[in-house]
Amino acid sequence: MTDSFAAHWERRHAADPVLQEFDDVRDRGRERPHDYVFLVDIEDETVLDALGAAADALDDLDGVEGASREYLHATVKMLGFVVSDPTGEDEVSRETAARLAAEASDAVDDIDPFELRLPRLNVFPSVVFCEVHDDGVLGAVHDRLLGLDGMPRYRYDGDDYTPHVSLAHFDTEAGFRRAVEWTEANRKVDAGRVIVDAFKLVDIDLREAYPTFETVERYELG
């Protein structure tokens, strides 16, 4: 995973920025408001202070929108949009979502509490993020969830899964360039360490730019 982080950093100037049009996101959210995601919620106040300060500084840049403290998390696996009549590849029925939520408990049953390290910032074409180092635990859990029968597979699943905490999105190409320059000057964030003692399945309301999460299931570790 370290090599993946290094590769993303090396490509930061060559990347074509992916701009986030929050009006479009909100429009889609009105049609499909229930987006289910397995994640690790960041709750440690010291870590939130460090990451929140970076997000606030990025938010001060023109063309960049920083995340709220309440939004900060590390995605483990996207489940999909829960709808009555699924037709898209990213949609699941309520019955399938409930089954996958139950089966996820068995998938993480033998995982003990573990540590996340958050040493530095990095850049995807779509976000500035904090790297998550965990000796491969999140990747292993991701693969288990991906292997559940009926679990949708997305572009950044499998070998392309990179654990991270998103801090800011880009509204404009100029904003992307400003964010890259800022990250180069402020890359070492040393946000500390987080002991993960639970995963969550949450319902994300995409009608908000940086929404809060409603917990659907909580999976205690150990």
Image: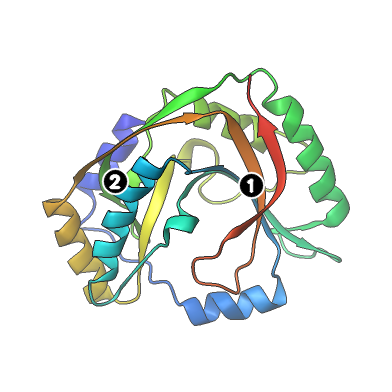
Specify whether 127 is left or right of 14: right
Estimate how packed mark 1 is, as few (under 14), some (14 to 19) or many (20 or more) residues with alpha carbons within 10 Å: some
Examine the rendered structure and indicate whether residue 174 appears above or below residue 77. below
Which residue, given by chain and number where applicable, does mark 1 sit on? 153
Q: Residue furthest front?
A: 45
Question: Image point 66% across, 51% down: which residue?
Answer: 202
Q: Is any part of residue 129 visible from this angle?
A: no
- Label 1, secondary structure: give it: loop
Examine the rendered structure and indicate whether residue 171 appears above or below residue 96. below
Specify whether 179 is left or right of 167: left
Q: What amino acid is found at the position of numbered circle 1 in the picture?
A: Arg
Along the line of sight, the residue nearer the viewer: 72 or 16: 72
Q: CA distance from mark 2 to mark 1?
A: 22 Å
Image quarter in which the N terminus is found: top left
Specify whether 214 is left or right of 172: right
Question: In the figure, residue 207 lies in which quadrant?
Answer: bottom right
Along the line of sight, the residue nearer the viewer: 67 or 128: 67
Q: What amino acid is found at the position of numbered circle 2 in the picture?
A: His
Q: Earlier in the sequence, mark 2 or mark 1?
A: 2
Image quarter in which the C terminus is found: top right
Examine the rendered structure and indicate whether residue 190 appears above or below residue 129. above
**In x, y percent, where is residue 159?**
49, 36
Tell me if label 2 and label 1 are in contact, CB under 8 Å.
no
Which residue, given by chain and number where applicable, does mark 2 sit on? 8
Estimate how packed mark 2 is, as few (under 14), some (14 to 19) or many (20 or more) residues with alpha carbons within 10 Å: some
